[in-house]
Image (cartoon, helix red, strand yellow):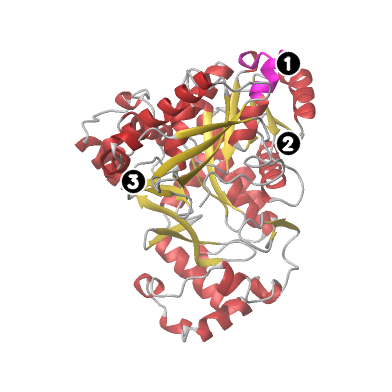
Amino acid sequence: MSNLLTPSSEDAFQQFVSTPLDMLLAEHQTINPEEKVLAMFHRCAKEVPAYQKFLKAHGVSFAEISTYSAFRTLPLMNKTDYMKAYPLPARCLGGKLSGSDRVAVSSGSTGQPTFWPRSVKNELDVAVRFEQVFHDSFRVHERSTLAVVCFALGNWVGGIYTASCCWHLARKGYPLMVATPGNNKTEIFRVIREMSPLFEQTVLLGYPPFVKDVIDAGAAEGINWAAFNPKLVFAGEVFSEEWRSLIGQRIGSDSPCFDFSSLYGTADGGVLGNETPLSVAIRRWLAEHPEAARNLFGESRLPTLVQYDPCSRFFEVHEGTLVVSGESDVPLVRYHIADKGGLLSLDEMWDFLRKQGVKSLHELGLNNDFIPRKLPFVYVFGRTDFTVSFYGANIYPENVTVGLEQSETIGWVTGKFVLETRDTEDGDKYLHIAVELLPGIEPDETMVHVIATSIRTQLLRLNSEFANYTPAERQLPRVTLCFFADPAYFPVGVKHRYTRK
């Protein structure tokens, strides 16, 4: 199995820049991902001191793990029992940091921030996901392109990681220039005005709510987005297809399957998968057919749906949550990322769609001559603790989001809200939603009624539990309209939570 292991950094870079994407992915099709992940396990068991102690603590003899079925019996890594239990150098190959030349820091939203060393060798594996997006969706190999990194710059994983992967693509020969204004709108607009007219297309990369702010604020300052043929790359949050359509209208996009891509990434594992034209087309079809979506995913909300390369990031499902293995400077072997989700092969996806009556790519909104990549799907709901229970129905923030993104409401609200249940003086439960207004918007009772009605309509359409469990007289939520950046619900500089217990 040694021929399946990662080459040196220099060899890896030369292979990356000299190998066309089609050839690289075709080579991966010839590799058995189960054999590859088993080989990675044996290397880690021999060369990673922390993993050796971890296996010993669980009574595992690595010599007995000789098949993939045995691999699946290995204990799961997680942040508490592994990442925080052993020193950082001990979690690296060889027990040293000397093989790494950069470091990222996780957000720390679940506790103490965690440091993740990286090297070019392992970064290139993630750069292939960006190459897929830029090549297959945006056709960057055919068009001069300005990539504007709108993620925050600094030790956080998003900004520098994204910029570095884009630089790798430029060095590979793509006609690509990378600008790094970060999440500074003034600098973003300066770049757009001066540089975008010099390129055939402009790609904005950032968190969905921030990119929306950039687009809206830019339009208010006279930027004609459509003139720059914009493409958008997102990460970090699930969004609805109504939201994608809204943003498409504001940038002049008439090709949502090719003008957008969302990345599924984590600080520990890098980019694990990416939206493709096929996955976007399928998700948009499912958004129009909520009953089919419930049958496929088992919930009344749409997850992020991406395709992934099992030779890069190997997924398993454990009790409805995702487990990933992958080579990195801190190797991940059955690492429990705790995101709720699941896996579907390409054949399984097509079998499902055919049973729903979908016979062709054209019915999904793609040209019949489009050739999708032969890659499996992973779907991700995110963490499982952000729902509100109301009359026994699980109310998801994603359902409320769609209600705020309708044409009659979107001109008033930022999209942020806080969902909670409250009690009346008589002890009756009701659904309360605090909604943030756009800057300069004054609240009135007409808005309250329109927003509440829109949210109820979408809850009834999307959430069968809500429709069947909640008494009709309790289905209309009580809405409180809050001024922009209201400190009680929407404080500035704090990671927003969409539910409150």
User: For the residue labelled by badge 1, is the local secondary structure a helix, a strand or a loop?
Assistant: loop
Q: Earlier in the sequence, mark 2 or mark 1?
A: 2
Q: Nearer the viewer, residue 357 or 68?
A: 357
Report the amino acid beneath label 1: Glu
Report the amino acid beneath label 3: Glu
In screen coordinates, is 43 left or right of 122?
left
Q: Earlier in the sequence, mark 3 or mark 2?
A: 2
User: For the residue labelled by badge 2, is the local secondary structure a helix, a strand or a loop?
Assistant: loop
Residue that badge 1 annotates: 221
The span shown in magenta is 215-226
Q: CA distance from mark 1 to mark 3?
A: 41 Å
Q: Which mark is residue 299?
A: 3
- What x and y, as percent, mark residue 338? 48, 60
Q: Is residue 219 magenta?
A: yes
Packing grade of label 2 (10 A; few <14, some 14-19, many >=20) is some
Report the amino acid beneath label 2: Asn
Q: Which mark is residue 183?
A: 2
> Residue 51, can we see it?
yes
Quarter location, residue 353: top left
